[in-house]
Image: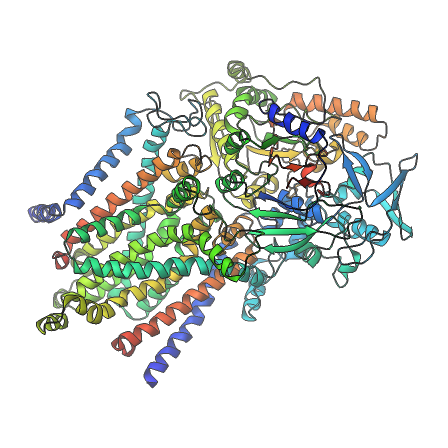
Amino acid sequence: MTSRLSYVALRALQVIPAVLAIAVLNFILLHMAPGDAADVIAGLSGHASAEMTAELRRSFGLDQPLIVQFFVYIGRLLTLDLGISLIQSRPVVELIAERMGATLILMLTAIGVAVGIGLLLGILAALRHRSWTDTALSVLALVVYATPQFWLGLMLIVFFSITLDIFPSGGMRTIGAEFGPIHSVLDVARHLVLPAGTLGLFYVALYTRLMRTSMLDIMTLDYITTARAKGMSELRIAFTHAARNALLPIVTLLGVQVGHLLGGSILVETVFGWPGLGRLVLDALLQRDLVLLLGILFISSVVVVLTNLLVDVIYGLLDPRLARK
Amino acid sequence: MTVQVASGVVSLWHRFRRNRAAVLGLAIMALIVLAAAFGPLLYPVDPFDMLGRPSTVPSQRFPLGTDVSGRDILAGLLHGARVSLLIGIAASLAATLVGLVVGALAGYFGGWLDAVLMRTTDFFLTIPSFVLAVLIVAIFQPSVLIITASIAVVSWPSVARLARAEFVSHQGRDYVDACRAMGMSNAEIMLRQILPNALPPVIVIASLMVATAILTESGLSFLGLGDPNIISWGYMIGVGRTVLRTAWWMSAIPGVTILITVLAINLVGEGLNEALNPRMRQR
Amino acid sequence: MMKTVLGVLSVGLAAALGATAAAQTPVRGGSLTYTYHPEPTAMSTVSTTAVPVALVATKIYDSLLEWEGAEMKPVPGLAASWTRSDDGRTWTFKLRDGVKWHDGQPFTSADVKFSVENIAKAYHSRGRAHFGDVEAVETPDKSTVVFRLKAPVPYFIKAFQPTETPMLPVHKFAGVDLASAAAVRQAEVITRAPVGTGPFKLKEWQRGSHIILERNPDYWREGRPYLDQIILRVLPDGAARAIAFEKGEVDLAPQSALPEAELQRLGKLPGVVTSSAGTEALGPNLWLEVNLREPPLSDVRVRRAISMALDRSRIIDVIWYGYGKPGIGPIVSSDPNFFNKALKPYAYDPKKAGELLDEAGYKRGSDGVRFRITQNVLPYGENWTRLGEYVKQELSKLGIAVDTRSADLAGWLKTVYTDYNFHITSTFQHNYSDPTIGIERSYHSANIRPGAAFQNSMGYKNARVDQLFDLSKRELDPAKRKAQFDELQQIIHDEQPVIYLLEMQYVHLFHKRVHGLISNGISMYSNWANVWKEK
């Protein structure tokens, strides 16, 4: 027990340099970009004099030497202050908090449903190995895997929103409508179907393939053969013995994918006008709102690092050998 | 030596051939490569030239119709094939090379070098890959070179991890010790002895990476982060998006093309996987 | 005359106007939903005058005056009356009594003085242009404001438009460091909790999704506004905006909020009105900006050749779907007051363009290329990308090889306006309601200053042009002033320091049930107190 605790503590300690390294890299990368927020504000107002641009730059501290800006940034990070957005003039934390919910709803729904369906299909394909079900599932998974997500989203809009008119084409809720709590949830759900479906299909394909491979690997192992010899049914073996162990690689992948959630959603959020973090990242980038961008990247990397830590711990629980290593 | 290689290729082909889907994928790939190589020569139409009326349906003059600016969609498809394949293959090669070197060094030497290299690799894995690609392209301004580089930057870590695992597993084996006893240098052992054994799984993952790279490029172009001087499939989908309602085929055509290409590459990748990794052949 | 009616769609619009003329009685209540992208970044044009902010802020924050017709005739608003001294150096405004801020505080002359002196003059992007000559602002009593100017400013009154000089509540700036641009920009009433005197106030702002404005029950004008709510739906995808409009979820798509490809189709639907009236005081003018420091573009013959090689009607028809007119010169032809009617667009004549280049000594090389240039493209979306592709294609036929460089807004601004590291780039400029405000920035040599966005990046220098700008800036006689601008337009037209391509047409698309939208030269930036919607 103590060894497991110290293992967790050790992994947790490793998180700190990782997060700091990410902060440094983000800072360097973003400051290599030509133009800054003062340029954008001046440009958007269409009329700024050189003095106005200079004054903006001065009041944002963008005229300071890079190294000074860097220490200001790190200093703020250490006090968990993410700063104030240059373009929107509001605290970054607030801006992120406003968008986090939408992204979480979209992502958790997509991934949650996808993992569920993917695992079942994966097990099914593995049980029916080399049957036409297996082939059909594999081909389908491959096709979905090969489809550009944003394009799939557009096609779903054409079909379900325009032609059939059963789902809204974008947004997260019906604006201005005064719904009770139940209707509000249903309303969001209706808006959620197409974007979550677009994202989810991809993950269904991914997890089906992964689970199938993982199951096939395990079904050849000795202890399964033993179970078979004892006369257990294939179905029972699959669900009780094999599935638990086949889950290991899935959990690892999930950990890695938490980070990709944000990225995957840029395209889908753009297509569906979903008010989440992905759009915020893109807008911040295009407007050179470095403070906001650094804030989002920092938060998302912290989330990824923490999730990976969690995955390691869960892994350790599922497979005690690893923790001891 | 040559005989050995030749017979190796022949037996590889025999194993590969058993997977009919993979052969189909290979055939499609061959067609696409041919189209990319010779299409623009056989169908010499400038994909940026506004030749016809905007948004026309397929006709004799424009076999796949025209886009919003009256440009030939077929010409765009053929020229776009070059760009998509070029970026896909170049990015995957670059990523594979970097990944192999990092993975090999980390796996072979172990110790602090392993720790440093692998922490760096993990670090890249924590940044959402598409976000990182968007960042790099936006910061350095879109061009073919930057787009290729950005895709390579987000792709190499997975190769590095795989390569490391392979090198670690071979490192401790008898034949490597024997080589060392014979006085072979580390470089020789890594390149001549371990690499050929470690290569098959890397080749498989590299082939699949081409598919991902093509998808990533199309996503970037769709967001308007493509090279403005060339036409690519993702760009064509972006162009068609504005008239989705009236001319859905304009984005459907390049979309299906990407789908088929990526599918073919995946099929070939799976076939290679089965042919190269005999352990898994039973599946 | 104020209604620039689109030829194709004139029937529909005439019908709509006819309906209005039939004097339907306005109905109170209902909400108007419009869509625009991107989302506003602030609630006041002090932060930025970018379209999304201007659209929403003008409903909340009024200026001193209101405006009538395409000629922009000033009429009483927050100021009930005003006078100008004969020498043009003293302006006196009498404020309306009993006007309250959204938080219930009274609106007084102290607010006006503060809004002009501390905010607009210091931090509004056109503040220095409007108020640079203001010597003193006096407030003899709570409802009187006197502006004393160093020298006469013929366009002074035009500063009091809602986008230019919004009235802000001085009592909400307690504790704000007025010397810091960042601090002022971060003030709550500017970023997220606006307190104005306008007919609408902010009810809800769900970032990335929508904004709801609600009726101000204490608005000073009796019985106004008609609408209960104005809702903005933020939809990042153009096709999605079009679908929302088509399904009737959205009443209005202002100022070309929809892709042109969709405008054409949706405009033909029954019950839909297409109009490009109501933008006369904006006057968007699109051109290729040329870096005159770079040979061979420094040669006027080369610029004329390029100008002749581009087919303006093709650009309008194919890229802008028929919306717009051929570009002519620095002032757009729809300007009712200042346009020089003697000027004509450069005619499309690639053959003559080629001869002109031969004559200038730029003959085709063995590869057919005369010379190579780079092109930047304004990163404002699809049409601009298409335009860049067309320019590249057309110039290559003329023997000019063009390498297009792509960048996002920040990168583009820095390249063009700070580094001057470009050959040609597409861009556009708003004429606004006065040429001194609208166009001087691009052609006066005093505006060749690195870092000044959308100003004289070409390095254009002509002593006579400078002189004419300096004279017209002080000329109180409208006829003399017009003559000065006419001469100025002629010179610039001949020298083509930029290549005028297109007078853009902003198109508003709305459902017929909405009335009273088109009221003046800045209709979408008016406060919409008189807009109403059929039940």
Quadrant (top left, top right, bottom left, bottom right) of the N terminus of chain C: top right
Quadrant (top left, top right, bottom left, bottom right) of the C terminus of chain C: top right
Q: Residue at x 32, y 49 (%)?
A: B212
- Quadrant of residue B263 in the image? top left
Q: Position of residue B204 (x, y in %)?
A: 22, 52
User: Would residue C230 appear left or right of B142 to someone viewing this image?
Assistant: right
User: Would residue A315 appear left or right of C411 to someone viewing this image?
Assistant: left
Q: Position of residue A255 (x, y in %)?
A: 36, 65
Q: Residue at x 41, y 25 (%)?
A: B56
Q: Is residue B185 depicted above or below C410 in this figure?
A: below
Q: Residue at x 42, y 25 (%)?
A: B49
Q: Position of residue A273 (x, y in %)?
A: 49, 48
Q: Residue at x 14, y 54 (%)?
A: A130
User: Would residue B240 appear left or right of B97 to someone viewing this image?
Assistant: right
Q: Is residue A324 depicted above or below B165 in this figure?
A: below
- Res. B194 in view: no
